[in-house]
Structure formats: structure tokens, C-alpha cells
Image: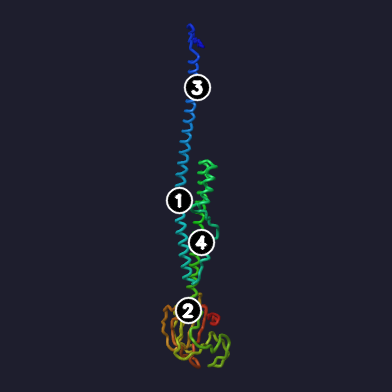
Amino acid sequence: MKYTLILIPGHEQPRYVTLSAWIWRWILITGFAFAVIFCSTLYFYSSFLNSFRQRDVLLLENQKLRQDAQSLVVKLASIEDDLKAVEMISHRIYEVTQSDFSSLLKPSRHIPRNIGPLTVEEYKSFKDAEKEESEANLQQDKTSELNEVLTSADHVKEISKDEAHKLQTYIKDIQEMKEKSKTIPTVSPVKGWISSLFGLRNNPVTGMHRMHQGIDIAATKGTPIYAPADGVVTLVAKAADYGNYIEIKHGFRIITKFAHVETSFVKKGQKVHRGEMIALVGDTGRTTGPHLHYEVREDTGKPKNPLNYIR
């Protein structure tokens, strides 16, 4: 069987091409095959270009993840340094107060604990979930999770800095309080017994009823007298009634006076510390026997009961 193809080129005479059936069949098959190959080539070329675009996107996202991971490592290292500083401050507080303040290091807010390698079970779950979502979405999710971790790391760092600042302020206050406490006359200046209290009494020498502005501590002659607190000697003098006496100015506008002493070991302007020997008990001045007349006054001159200070 033969088929004739008529070609009409325009104004010329038509041309006739007669071909057998098997030739036409071969032409159709070849054309169809060429069309299939051409369409397939276009499809694969388009897919190839798309995969390149996706690869570029993934490369950029991977680069961002690497940068974020590096930033996280730096932040975690900084947090570790801050926590070490807090621990050192805690030890310093313990040295100052002789107390354990480790409970202060408990974080006041929740610190995330989802930082670290996956367990075997978590890894299997992760691989199963990976099959159900695209690579792009997975990268996006991981980027989001890492950003959350980075935000949490920043938050933890701020908390650690805040805790360190609080502890530094606390230890500073403790040190100041400890230093100030040394200037309060809270110890008895001499070992003896109280023979006369603060307040109105009959003077044992004159017999007159008058205000006793301190306390009398009876002790044998030559008994050491100690500074009841840190301070500065403001006066070493002698008077008819007090005999040889010493005045020391302490903190909180407090002045102490030590009268009837036998021998003084300090001089005006000298700094003394609590427990430092400053004199010996005597019976100089107007007295009926060896004892220490001990006064506590404000810098305005107002007398205070020494027993209110001695602990």
C-alpha cells in the first residue's frame, strides 16, 4: 500500500510525493520519538536547574546554620565564664561571712536544658520525621530551633550577669557591715565585776546623789584594759576626778572613755583595734579603790548606758 503526499509551494505547480506505508510509519515513529526525547530533555533540564536553585538555597541555609552554631558556642563559653565568676563570688561570700550561700546560685528563672547531643531514641525519631518532610522545611525548622536556643542562651547570659551583680553588691554590703561592726564597742574592756551601774546613785566619795554617766568595773590593779572596738585615740589626759583617762572615737559617732587607769599604752591620734591592750587598771583620781570607770557617749556628749552595747 502506498500513500501520496501533495506539496503546494505557492504559485508553482503542486508536487506529489508517493511513499510506501512502511516509510510513513517509520517517519511517524521517528517524529514521535524525537518529540518524546525533546520534551524529556526540557523536563530534566528544568528539574536540573530547579535542583541547582534548591542547592544554592540549602547552601546558604547551611552557611547560616554554621554561623549560628559558632555564635552559640561562643555564647555558651561566655555563659560558662560568667557562671564561674558567680561561683568565685559565692566562695568569697563564704570567706567573708563563714556561711554557705550556694543556694543563692539557684537560677531564678528556667534555664533551657535542650542543648546537647541526641540520644539513640531521639535520633531514630528524628530520622523517621525526616522522611515525612522536605529538606527545605527541615532546614527551616532547624534554623528556627537554633535561633530559639541562641535567644535562650542570651537570656541565660543576662540572668548569670544579673546574679553575679547581685552577689557582688551583697558581698560589698557584707564587707561594709563587717567593717562597721568592728567600730561598735560590743565587748567589755576589762575582766572584772560591775560594782556600779549607769544612772542616778549616791557618789561613794562625796555621798551626793548624782548621775553616774558610766559603769564601774572592779578589778585588781594592773589588770589589762582592752579597746572594745576599732577607733582612734582622741585624748590621753589627766583630771582631778577621772585621774588618768583615755578617750577613743569609734564609728557611728560613738566615743568611749576609760578613767582611773594606772598606765596608758597609747597616744593621741593612734589607731587601735578591738582587743588591743590600751592601759592597765589603776586607782588614780577620785576613787575608793582600783577599778575602771567606763563610759560610752555620743559625739554630742550625751552619755549612753555601756551595758546596752556589751554583748
Residue under circle 1?
A: 71
Across and down, in percent, residue 196 comes to: 55, 88
Do the numbered discs 1 and 3 sit on residues whose CB atoms are within 8 Å? no
Of the two numbered discs 1 and 3 on the same chain, state the one appearing first in sequence.
3
Secondary structure of residue under mark 3: helix
Depth check, front residue: 40 or 286? 40
Residue type at mark 3 is Phe
Which residue occupies 46% across, 44% down? 62
Secondary structure of residue under mark 1: helix
The image shows residue 178, relative to residue 216, as above or below, that is above
Residue under circle 4?
A: 163
Q: Distance between the residues labelled 2 and 1?
A: 55 Å
The image shows residue 112, relative to residue 301, as above or below, that is above
Q: Is residue 279 left or right of residue 130?
A: left
Secondary structure of residue under mark 4: helix
Q: Nearer the viewer, mark 4 or mark 2?
A: 4
Q: Distance between the residues labelled 3 and 2?
A: 112 Å
Q: Nearer the viewer, mark 2 or mark 1?
A: 1
Do the numbered discs 4 and 2 sit on residues whose CB atoms are within 8 Å? no
Do the numbered discs 4 and 3 sit on residues whose CB atoms are within 8 Å? no
